[in-house]
Amino acid sequence: MTVISSNLGYPRLGEHREWKHLLEHYWRHDLDEDQFHATAKTLRLANLAKQRDLGVDYIPVADNSDYDHVLDTLAAFGATPTRFGHFDHALTLTDYYAIARGTKTATAAEMTKWFNINYHYIVPEFDDVHFQLLDNRWLRYYQEAKTELGIDGKPVILGPISFLKLGKRHGQYLDDAAVAELLPQLLPLYEQVFTELVAAGAQWIQLDEPTLVKTTDSAEILPYQQALTTLHQAVPALKIELQTYFDSLDLYDQVVDLPVQAIGLDLVHDHGENLAHLVDHGFPSDKVLAAGIIDGHNVWASDLTKKFALVQQLTDIVTTDRLWLQPANSLLHVPITTKNETQADPVLLGGLAFADQKLQELATLTTAANQGITSVQARFDDNQAHLQALNTSSHRNNQAVRQAEQHLADQTFERQAPFATRIKLQHDRLNLPLLPTTTIGSFPQSKLVRSKRAAWRHGDLSDTDYQAFLNAETKRWIDIQNDLGLDVLVHGEFERTDMVEYFGQKLTGFYATQNGWVQSYGSRGVRPPVIFGDVAYTEPITVAASKYAQSLTDKPVKGMLTAPLTIINWSFVRDDLPTAQVQNQIALALRQEVQNLEKAGIKVIQVDEPALREGLPLKQRHWQAYLDEAVYSFKITTTGVANDTQIHTHMCYSNFTDIIDTIKALDADVISIETSRSHGEIISAFEQTGYQQEIGLGVYDIHSPRVPTVDEIKANIERALRVIDARQFWINPDCGLKTRQEPETIAALKNMIAARDAVQSRL
Ligand code: GLN
Ligand code: ZN
């Protein structure tokens, strides 16, 4: 009896982002619906054939999507928001994309983060739904794989409880009572899907219930139990793999007892807890353990020897005929293949594994488990050689970085004087009006800015000409800011594409992939940098740009950096060191940058931390360690300056109530936050906790091209002033302006300043 290899889901984008281009061509009407479907099918089948050729035994089907799997689920079950009309047939592509992207008359459905991953799903709206099975897509794709490729696939379906819990009713996520109310209408549709799949010959169905990792209280298991019991009774021939991922199961004993035939556990991002449960509590002898042993959201090659030892440990717990080896979560969240990274240092390349390489690792481990390690000895040897080469390389053994790390423990990272003292010195030095105005950093990345950058990258524009262009753009915007009458100016961030890449290019230890795209939402991909070596500061990063901007004006120019935690959260981070250690390396490097900005005459320095909240661990018991580390690395970065240098930070959201202590502990002099859409709740939170530092009110929403009126902005400012003293506030947009057009940006800022002036004159 043999160990089986199984996959949970495969990336959609395509090796050369064919899927992304397909969607976008269709949206631009370059293709009709039939052409779209034909190409989508080719891509889908190619992905399946590839997994088969890589040696995967149980290949997931129906994990493909035309946008997002939660949207697919709600479309199939007729749970479409009513503003898009009523459907009694499968949605056309037009209807489907209307929900995702909105129409002239109906706003798009909300999108939000998928657990703690940088993937965004469409939030179901269960306000007024009448569930009905409009499309058994799982059956369609199961049959297609079978007929076209002879693959007897494992259909993947989002489970009913996770589906409901990921959605909202009346603007609130569903609680257990709401789930209990809707479940009886939804379950018969799952029964029908499963009955049809079983009739068509499906052996196993992968039922994803990722919300199980968030259950802590025994009562929370009840809806899952009810759903699975009902399904089991209705379709007794059905074999369900109940799949969990992204963390451990607190209710391990209850979950493994549920009436299913296989349990999928994450053994990578579980803080060691799932393995501890397996060892301490054992595993039911009548079930399959689908062991998630390969990291599904990082890009590193596994240490096959260590993984094989884990496999052997698992075979002491379950018999080999009841063991599947899997990635810990869907490979949707990693890039597709390292084979197109033709410019990577071979030492790094040997240590990387994207989706295809991960599947190869699974196949190797499965063969080793079934036929002994000697049958795949060469692969194990290669793997050891690659990892050793990377680990002993100069990239990972920078002595200066090591020494600096060792000294961390003997230092404290605090500003010289407390805030109350600093702020007086800063006020004297900066001499700003009441309610000073500023922006968050970026100005529009126009077509011209992007085309110059592309030309420079392709070698069609010299370094000197590119630099001259960037300076000219900064000068143009310094003039605009002066004309508008802003109080603290910025250089505009024209040299950057995003928050991380530019810093990665200037620090050691970063690799920018050529093709390492992962889906962020819809057709949108991101290409996170890979932090593979020790991070060291070798040259100033932003100093020249800030210094140049400052030379053009008497007003203070604000320096602009991304904080260590945000760099970490938006990168693929090496897994041979604790993440916190890598974060501190970045912090030590940025500390030098902050000090160099100060030396260059920059009096105000903003260190952005927009990813703080989205990176919070799934389980609250892990929050404190994460937040402490965020504060520590922020303070390493920002505390090496004089009292009269003003440190700002920026976060794009406003729900801080539960992390307000962390916000305070950052000890930034000014924090800018979103206030325009949250109706001032945050301000009361600051008030209640006696927050002393200054607050930049994000008084208008930059996510829309709409120009806010003076009155609207005034109302936002006045609301805040009702609670906290005017001396504590700054006025700014709620985030950077890089995605906006120039005319609307100038018009909006003009109104913002007029609103400030109007309020100021009455104080
Ligand atoms: N300084 C950055 C900008 O203005 C901040 C972006 C962000 O918060 N995501 O673009
Ligand atoms: Zn922001």
Image (cartoon, helix red, strand yellow):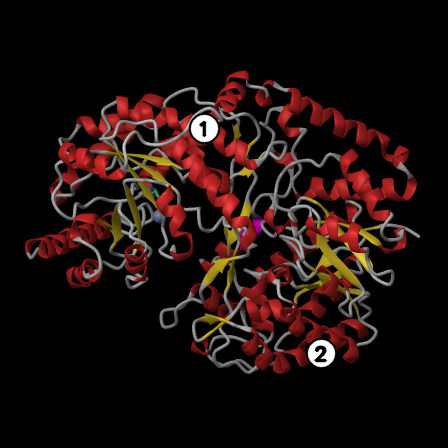
Q: Which mark is residue 505?
A: 1
User: Is label 2 in a helix, a strand or a loop?
Assistant: helix
Q: Dividing the image into four equal quarters, which quarter contains ligand 1? A: top left
Out of 212 and 422, give the one closest to the viewer: 422
- Residue 144 visible in the current orientation: no
Our reading of the magenta stretch's main secondary structure is helix
Q: Is residue 361 above or below residue 331?
A: above
Residue position for label 2: 192
Q: Is residue 435 left or right of residue 573?
A: left
Tell me, yes or no, whether the highlighted magenta stretch contains residue 20. Answer: yes
Q: Is residue 673 left or right of residue 300?
A: left
Q: Is residue 295 above or below residue 24?
A: above
Q: Earlier in the sequence, mark 1 or mark 2?
A: 2
Q: What residue is rendered at 75% in x and 40% in y? A: 361
Q: Position of residue 156 (x, y in %)?
A: 69, 62
Q: Tell me where the magenta segment starts and ends, as one range.
A: 18-22
Look at label 2 and name its amino acid.
Gln
- The image quarter containing residue 657 is bottom left
Look at label 1 and name its amino acid.
Gln
Tell me, yes or no, whether the highlighted magenta stretch contains residue 752. Answer: no
- Residue 485 visible in the current orientation: yes
